[in-house]
Amino acid sequence: MADQQLNAPPCAASPVPSSGIGHDNRRHPDRFTVVGNHLTQHRELSLTAIGLAAHIQSLPAGAKVSIKRLAERFPEGEVRIAGALRELEAHGYLTRTRERLPSGQVITRTVSYNNPPAMAVSAQPPPRPAPAPPEAPLPLPEAHDTAATTLLTDLRRHDPRLLLAERDVRRLAPAATAWLDRGITPEAVRRTLTAGLPATPIHHPAALLAHRLTEFLPPPLPASPTAPPRPDPLQNCDHCDRAFRAPRPGRCRDCIAHSATAAA
């Protein structure tokens, strides 16, 4: 007689944890990109920046990665994509350098780095494109535009998180000029733009400043009341030497009337 089985065999362990994420991993035979966890689990980059970095690393050499081209590919729009590119530059995943070709055309050369932490440890610094020759100076704007550009560029001295790209400064300068045209001093504009900033990282400083410049714009001052006209200066009559008011020297009204009567 067979022995009685007293214990049932244990159930197979479930591949999915009771809580949290589970993984069903399959091998990629082709068309895959290796992305480090230092990027996908980065504690300071936004999700937009992480996803954009992964996309750029998957592209072949020579692919176009301008802000306009990326905005055509993704729904985030140029403002969010520009902010994500600046994040990647700040953390070493990307460099963008403007270069002037022998033909005179100015291009932006972009280099993607798939492992900045390893490059920081290495004794050799990461390869950098050769510095571009200086560009011809831009024409100087009007006085208020120059003051607005200086004001916006100087904001990073008061808060490093308000570092703006050159194109953002040019885009925001007309809005800052509107404040100056309404008699607001640059210091007052600066206080409005830097007061009460959040303690968290500012991922899109240009968008924040554009909002404040638009929403907090004060109304123009009312026109000053017209001053009453000044009275004519005192003159001495050429005939009777009596004082009277007139715009220029001559005879008083009485002497003019007397002469008219005598002539009649």
Image: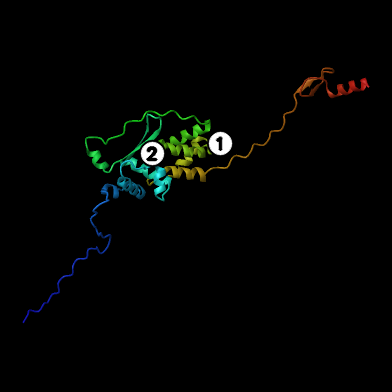
- The image quarter in which residue 21 lies: bottom left
Residue found at the far bottom of this picture: 1
Which mark sits nearer the N-terminus, 2 or 1?
2
SS for tag 2?
A: helix
Q: Nearer the viewer, residue 7 or 234?
A: 7
Mark 2 → mark 1, Cα distance in angstroms: 27 Å
Residue marked by disc 2: 160
Residue found at the far front of this picture: 103
**Vertical order, 166 against 3 (above or below):** above
Residue marked by disc 1: 181
Quarter placement of the N terminus: bottom left
Q: State left or right for residue 173 relative to residue 81.
A: right
Q: Residues within 10 Å of mark 2 (few under 14, many from 20)?
A: few
Q: State left or right for residue 90 relative to residue 240.
A: left
Q: Nearer the viewer, residue 58 or 180?
A: 58
Residue 188 position in % (x across, y down): 50, 38
For the question of whether residue 209 can be seen, the reply is yes
Report the label total: 2
* Amino acid identity at mark 1: Asp
Residue found at the far left of this picture: 1
Residue 182 position in % (x across, y down): 56, 37
